[in-house]
Amino acid sequence: MKNFILVLFLVISVNSFAQESKIKVVTEEIPNRLAFYAINENEQDLDVMITIEGTNFRQSKARPRLVRVPAISKVHLKTIMLVRGKNPQYTYNLVVNDSLSKRALKKEATAIKIKPKKNITVYVPPMCNQCDSLLQSLANGKYLFQMHKLEENTEMKNQLNRSFANTMQLDSLETPIINLGGKLFTKINNYEDLITKLEFED
């Protein structure tokens, strides 16, 4: 299973599709099988259809169908059966539509996290009373983020002190310090405030 000869042939069919990123296809190895998944990093639902051609594997002869891939999610598209002792060689063709079909298959979708417009880093001061709630909301949300506890990283704490020109006592802060794309904020009190800054702050 380690030395696949993989050739990717990707065709995107789009109807007024204006999102920056499109569908990604990833594979997962299963004993004697290879599963194909669609990853939708867009904030809109899409219909996806995959067709696979090649050798050293078997697949269902059923006619390919569109599969609904909800916004910011991962959905299984198809699984091929591998010929024992041989490396599969295949190409796939992918069709992606933002005009949703009533006939599209609706499979189980797994939520994913996506990269925000601006990188999110949360610095947690020792006395932060609101950090737990914000961090929990971020963990349950759609965006990737980083978190650092200042009491565990003296060097980072010193860097932040220099960034603020030693004008505040970080140990006494009761709100997190949040870096959004390189800009520091100390008055973001909750997840809603963070998203507002993320979307609209220059």
Image (cartoon, grey):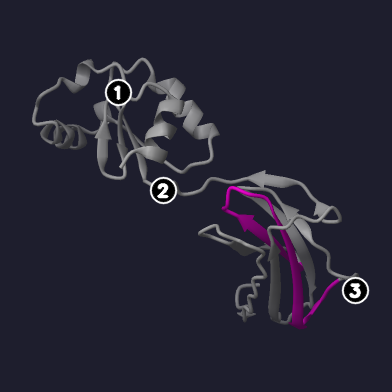
Left/right placement of residue 59 relative to residue 174 reads right
Q: Is residue 104 magenta?
A: no
Question: Which comes sooner in the sequence, label 3 or label 1?
Answer: 3
Mark before the other along the chain sequence, 3 or 2: 3
Q: Residue 187, labelled with which disc?
A: 1
Q: Which residue has dot 3 on it?
A: 61
Q: Position of residue 154 (x, y in %)?
A: 19, 32
Place of residue 98 in the rendered image (x, y in percent of width and height, measured from the top left) = 68, 58
Question: Label 2: few (<14), some or many (≥20) within 10 Å?
Answer: few
- Callout 3: SS: loop
Q: Which mark is residue 157?
A: none
Res. 182 image quadrant: top left
Question: How far apart, in angstroms, are the residues tagged by discs 1 and 2?
Answer: 20 Å
The residue pinned by badge 2 equals 117
Query: With respect to residue 125, does 19 lie above or below?
Result: below
Given residues 19 and 104, the one toward you in this image is 19
- Judge the density around disc 1: few (<14), some (14-19), many (≥20) Cα neighbours within 10 Å: some
Location of residue 144 with respect to 102 vertically, above or below = above
The picture places residue 56, in percent across and down from the top left corner, at 77, 82
The image quarter in which residue 35 lies: bottom right
Point out the residue furthest to the right here. 62
